[in-house]
Structures are given as structure tokens and as C-alpha cells.
Image (cartoon, rainbow, N blue to C red):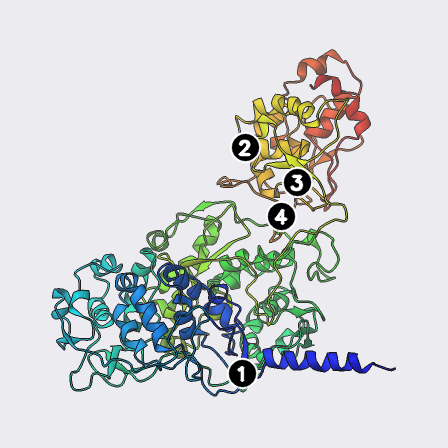
Amino acid sequence: MKISMDLTFAFVSLASMFSLIFGEKCEPISIKSCSNAGYSLTARFPDIDGTPYQDFLAPRLDLYNLLLQSCSAYASTILCSLYLPKCEEKRTDPQPPCYKVCKKFATECQDLLKKAGLAGVFTVLCDKLPDGNSTSNECFYPPNFKQSSSGGSKPIPKCYDVVDPVCKKHLHYNKTVMPTSLQTGEETLFQSIINSNCSDELEKFICYAQFSPCDPKQPRTIQIPCKSLCVRIHKNCWKEFNKAGLPLPPCDYVYPEDDNNPTGICEVKKWPASWPAQFRPPAPEIGTCEELTVKSCAKANYKYTAKYLKVGNETFQQKKGKLLDQLIPYIESCSPYSSLILCSLYLPKCVPGSARPMLPCRQVCLDFADKCKTKLTLVSTVGMTIALCDLLPFYDGTPNKCIMPESFKMKDSLQLFSTRNVCYKVTSSKCSKDLHYDKTFLPTDDQRAAELTILQPVIDSGCSPDIEKYLCLMRMPKCTADTSVVHLPCREFCKRINDDCDAVFKANRIVPLPCDSFFPEGGSSTGQCDLKSWPAPWPWKIPDPSPPVSDSPTKCVPLRVESCANAGYYYTADFPPIDGKPYQTVKGKSLKFFLDFLNVCSKYSSTIMCSLFMPKCMEGHPKPVMPCRSVCLEFVNKCHRLLSLASHAGLFRSLCDLLPEQDALLTTCFVPKGFTASTTSVDRRNGQCSKIREPKFCPDDLHYNLTFVVENEQTSDSILQTILDSKCSPDLEKYLCYTTVPPCKTNDLSVYVPCRSVCEQCTWIYP
């Protein structure tokens, strides 16, 4: 095969270009808030337990940049340089910003930095930067920075008396680098935290950060709070910081390690930019898989996982395999799918060429959680496991959507659907005082069982003030209408417990809490954060779910029917006219008739009824977007009496099962804003049948005698009795039997409704 010289040169040039962009040390910055920092490459930092370093830092940098970009165009240059410093392949260290850039940022943002208690810190940190000129390689200027061609020398810091009355009593020195005019008595953002008395060191910490010491004999010596002091503030005051909506001080990134100074203040010897001890090698090509070699995953129902980068001297599989080999033997006896679920949490299935992992189907996970309830309860994870199952794709027969083992039989499983939208009162006295909610999806009997835990020695030790709250969040998670979100302990909250109780875990041979594996980043005053995707590590960015676009995009039009104003959506398909009249006008009359009755019993009546006549439309999506099953079940639950009187309760109940369970995809189904399910829920059809006892009007020639409607809910009461008595149609009795007590076959969840021909014989009784 011959290749032209031009094509060969093009490939060589392209390869050279990629080697420059994706070198051994550097990689592009992907955090949006750093896009105007004045440089585009940073170091290849190692992943943090499978999470890319930049993804790990993104929430923090996005917050800091958002707050400070309003006062200075160079905020992102300074902040991003601290966390993701500029990288050049030929350098062995990061290239910092120049002194003048930092000084301008600190001056322009002085008021905000004072409120944040950081004015002094940045004033002195800037002094550690080189004052190079525009041609110097020791530091850099962002393109939009105006500076002279000559660098000049930095001024020698002057010392001023500490005059702030609060800080004078806390400091062991009386001179600071902060001018007297800037030592105002203005309160910082931390005043409410100081007033809470969460730590007797907090005011000292803030004073150190605001008014860094100045030694007239050594004015270039720079000191700020030590990391150990910062960590103590974290430990004692995290709740108060989160409650106030303030980020915790960045102990790991700015504040220096202790130098045995008992005062809690340490010397800064260089600009404290992060820099990796070892550079992360380039990630394998997307969809590169390798054989799953972990022994305990032999029965996981898949053979390949992603090719992860090494963690230190171990392969990723070796590191996770040690943990899986401890966990799976404990739980594999209760379910044949234990290894599938657990291995998918740590080493999910890889499909060659795909950027997404293939995960277990939700029904399999719920079956595992149900079968292993006793063992999961003992380790205080049953609530978490049930919740995590809702983040998995729901099996609907679509090939390769998720892992559905051949041996799995839905009819043998008692638990195939989410129960997190059904609420029960939290009964534990210990948990009710710790939690910020009083309803959980765990039934009362399961709550009692959850009191027993193998973590009791950790609780009894008193090693952490937060261990009880952590266990409550895990044992009795909050019930929620939005089952696409899982509420779990925040990662930092979990890590504090691991740090506090490390010795107790080891003494009792208990595996530490899986903070980095499951729990979401972030902080809150409740200790609880939101998780929106299955928490398995993955070496590539998973594409956002998006609706498929058809070759001939669906045309959507505004939903103008007055009765559907509260349906929870605003667009429907552009249906053709009926007998020359607009479709919405014709169907709107029927909807008004029904909803005048049904709106009384449920605020979601319009969601269900309007979706039957004029379903939700999304541009480019070839199918209607229907309400999620939980909304339909809530409607049937609240309107059961009215639907029964109309002889249609059975029909609507079975139709609910044709709606999809809530999934991560926006186009799977929708729930109206603010949707909340009732405390009780309609029982789901489970393939169990009851003998038909009522209604009495069912004809003798009915071709079936079993229904899924239980006997105590079967009734002959009907507002249509007068019409039945008129004998106006020979098919009416049969039709109403079909809609009141629909047919049932044992272990069969098929939905049976009247044929259209039967219905058309009776349509004259409806508008």
C-alpha cells in the first residue's frame, strides 16, 4: 500500500503537535473558571482515588473565581496558579505569575479579601513571587496585563503596629505587614462562626491570616497560620462554615506544614503552588479495556474492566482487589449477584471503544439489596445500597443498555422497583435529633433492625462526635420524590470520621469507611451531599446523557389547553386537526370534563390525563416524554375512590406499569416540579392474582376469572349504574369489567385493556 509523502508529512506533523500539547508533564486545563487565567497547560497531577485531579478541584476553584473575578481581572491568574500552576515541558518546576500581577489582584480585591479574612495572607504571599519583566522566564504575565519593560525591585515590607483591638489580645507579636489604615474594625464573613464559639482558636487563626507578623530585623520573613491550626478549625467548625455557606479554609494547599512552632504560625519559604511528586502518565485511549483479574470478581458476569492508571506501585485492580476480596466473601452467600454489584462499584465493566461503563440493571441491584438486606443492615449500608440502585439504568428490553444476567428472573424477585418516594417517620430517637429531616424510605421494621451494627465498637469508643449522625444518614436515608438523586454523607464529613477513628477501626479489624469510593464532594451544614451518578471510578469523562435526534425532528408547539396549565410541562406535539378543528381545542373539551372531577383528589391528575391526550414533546426527540411511574401511582393512590366509582381504577392502575421508572436520561420520563409522593403508596402489581368476586355486573361469559385487584378492593359501586341498567349496549358490562378488574395471569405483568372495537361501542356515554 502506497502513502503519499504529503500524507506522511501530515501525520508526522499531527503527531508532533499532539506531543507538544499532551507531553509527559503537562496537560490542558479543563476547568472553565481558569480559562482566562493567562495560560492553558498545567501539570499532570495524579488522580485522587480514580477521580481526575482537575475534576476534584473544579468545585472549589469555580467558587473562588466566581467570588473574586468581580473585583479583579487577574483573580483566576492568581487562584488557578495556586492549585493548577502553569506547566512547561522544559521546566522542572511550575512557572508562577509575576509579583506585579499578584500585587494588583491583592490591591483590587482588598475589600473582599478582608471580608474573607485573607487580605494579610495574599499580601505576604505575593512577596514570594519573582518580579520579572515581560521577557523573563522566571514568571509570567497574563496577556491582558499592562506592565513596563523593566521589572524593578520589590519594596521592602514595612512594619506597622497591630491596632485591631480583638487581635491585640490573641497575637504574641505587636507588628504586622498590614498598614494601620487597613486594620479596620469591620467584621469579616466569619463573625457568625466566631459567635458560635465552635473553636477558641478561630479568632487567633483569623488574626494570623489578616495581620501577618512583621519583624523589623527580618522584614522579608513571611509567616501565616500553620496547617495544623487550620485543620483544627476544620474539625471543630465545619458545621458552622457550611451553615453560613462559606468554604472551609484550604488547609492542604496554602498553609505550611508545622515547623514545631507552638504558636500555630509558620514560615512561608516559597509561593505555595501545588506540584506533583510524580506526573500522571497520559490516560489510555478511550475505551481501552483489560481483563478483570480480581479473584472475587470471577462471578461478576463480565470479564473486562477499564485500563486504569497505576496508583503508586500498584495497579488499580490490585488496589481495589484487596478491598473487594474482603467485602465479597462476607456477602456473596445471600445473592448470586453480589459480586456483579460490588465489582461494578469499584471496577465496572468496560466495552471496547466506549466512553461509558456498562453497569448492572437497576432491577438486579434492587433484588441484591432485598436478598442481602440482613447483611447490609449489619454494616449499616442497606439504605445507601437501595438508594444507589436508583442511579442504574432500568432494564426495558433494550439490548446492551445494562448488564442483565441470563439467570435473573424478574418473576422470582419481590423487589423490582424503587421505594424511595414512599415515606415513613424516622422512629429512632438517636437519629431523630441528629437528622435535618423526619421521613425516610426505610419501613419501620427495617429501621428497628438497622439499630444493630458491627460498627457498635466504634460508636462506643466515642472516637468521633459525628459517627452516630453518619450512621443515621446511612441507615435511614431521606425519602425523596426525585429518585434520580441520592443523598449521602459528604466526603469531607466521612473523612473526618476516618481520621478520628483510625485507631479504633484498626483495633477492631474493621475496614475504614469508603469515603473516596462512594461519597460526593462538597460540604453542607447537614453533612449530607447529593450524588447524581453511579459512583464507580472511571478513567475517562463520561458523556452527558442527551436525547437522540431523529432524521426528521419532531415539531413541538406550546400546550395551550387551560386544564393542562399545571401539568408540569409546556410543549406537546403538533397534532393534525380533527374534522377541521385544532387538535388541542377538541381534546381540551374532554380533558376539562375529566379534570373537573379528578383535580379534587390529586394535584397530579392533570399531569397524567394531559399526558394521555397531549403528551410532553421535546424538540428532536422522536417519542413523547411520559410521566414517571411514581407520578402515575401517586395519582391512582389519591384518586382511587373516584376512579373506582367511574369503574376505571383497575385500568389506570395497570397503565401505570407501562410508564418508565425515573432514569438519568431527561427523555426517559419526567416528574413535575416539587413532586412529592404520599406516605403510603399503591401496591405494585407483582404477578399475584385474585379471584374475581365483584363487580356483580360482570357477564357470565367473561373469558377470565382472575384479576390483580385484591378482593377487598373489588366493588360493584359505579356512577354508571343507571346506564348499565338501561341495557343500552350489550358490550358495556364487559367493557366496564375489563376496566374495573383487568385480567391477570400468574407471574405475568402484561397489561390487558379493552380492544378499541369494544370501546367504540360505548363511546357515546362519554363527551
Bin the neighbour count of mark 1 within 10 Å (Cα to Cα): few under 14, some 14-19, many 20 and up.
many
Q: Which one is in front, 183 or 580?
A: 183
Mark 3: amino acid:
Cys
At numbered mark 1, what does the secondary structure look like: helix, strand or loop? loop
> Given the image, on which type of amino acid does mark 4 rest?
Glu
Q: Residue at x 41, y 84 (%)?
A: 138
Query: How far across and how far down the image is residue 529, in percent?
Result: 44, 58
- Look at the numbered disc 4 and give the secondary structure of its residue: loop
Q: Earlier in the sequence, mark 4 or mark 3?
A: 3
Circle 3 residue: 617
Camera-near label (2 vs 1) is 1
Judge whether 206 appears above or below 3 on screen: above
Residue type for callout 2 = Asn
Q: Nearer the viewer, mark 4 or mark 3?
A: 3
Q: Which residue is mark 4?
A: 661
How far apart in space, not on screen, are marks 1 and 3 (Cα)?
A: 48 Å
Q: Residue at x 57, y 31 (%)?
A: 605
- Residue corresponding to mark 1: 25
- Identity of the residue furthest to the right in this view: 1
Depth check, front residue: 393 or 108:
108
